[in-house]
Amino acid sequence: MGRRIKHTERDVDSLARLMLAEAIGEGPLGMVKVGTVVANRVEADCEPDFKNLRNIRHAIYQTIPGTGIPHFEPVLNGSLYTQRPDEGDLQRARDLLNGYRDPRAKMNLWFFNPSPGQKWRAPCTPTMPRSPMTSFDFAHKNHCFYNAVPNYCPEFYR
């Protein structure tokens, strides 16, 4: 279990939309793994990447420092806004905001789809592109999941 993240129904809807848009075709398990990473970022509160992410929307709309480019592809390409979550999707988002974390992804702060729009996944890289302080952890369907390297974000990895 992680910590509960204060939230509104709008936050629940936003997280459900992101999970749908990001992990479309990966089923409920893939969506929960993606949602776990987003919730972990709020919980981490560490510099330089995740300091002062106070709520789930801060994490969803966060930009890459110095670029103004959103971290998450669905925000950048607008697919976040076309999703229509059903009650199951909304419940998965609620569970995450209430402290549930996917056991396999509970220590991950990054994920990346190396082959967006494809039915296959290119190999995962040892570190996240543009994020050298990461270390590959595991792959699930189209996504590669990453942890921080030792001594990075110690507030989260205690």
Image: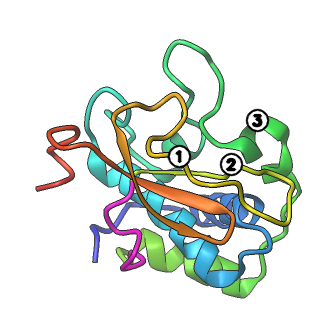
Position of the N terminus, as image quadrant, is bottom left
Element type at mark 1: loop
Quadrant in the picture for residue 24? bottom right
Q: Residue at x 37, y 50 (%)?
A: 42
**1 or 3: mark nearer the eye:** 1
Dots 3, 2 in contact, CB < 8 A: no
Q: Residues within 10 Å of mark 1 (few under 14, many from 20)?
A: few
Magenta residues span: 101-108
How was this image coloured? rainbow
Where is mark 3, residue-wise?
76
Where is mark 1, residue-wise?
125
Viewer-nearest residue: 85 or 73: 73
Element type at mark 3: helix
Q: Is residue 6 magenta?
A: no
Where is mark 2, residue-wise?
114
Q: Is residue 102 magenta?
A: yes
Dots 1, 3 in contact, CB < 8 A: no
> Is 76 situated left or right of 156 in this image?
right
Q: Residues within 10 Å of mark 2 (few under 14, many from 20)?
A: some
In the image, what residue type sits under mark 2?
Pro
In the image, what residue type sits under mark 1?
Thr
Position of the C terminus, as image quadrant, is bottom left
Farthest residue, direction bottom = 88
Give the spatial CA distance, label 1 vs label 3.
22 Å
The answer to which of marks 3 and 2 sits earlier in the sequence is: 3
- Residue 53 lies, in percent from the top left, at 39, 40
**2 or 1: mark nearer the eye:** 1
The answer to which of marks 1 and 3 sits earlier in the sequence is: 3
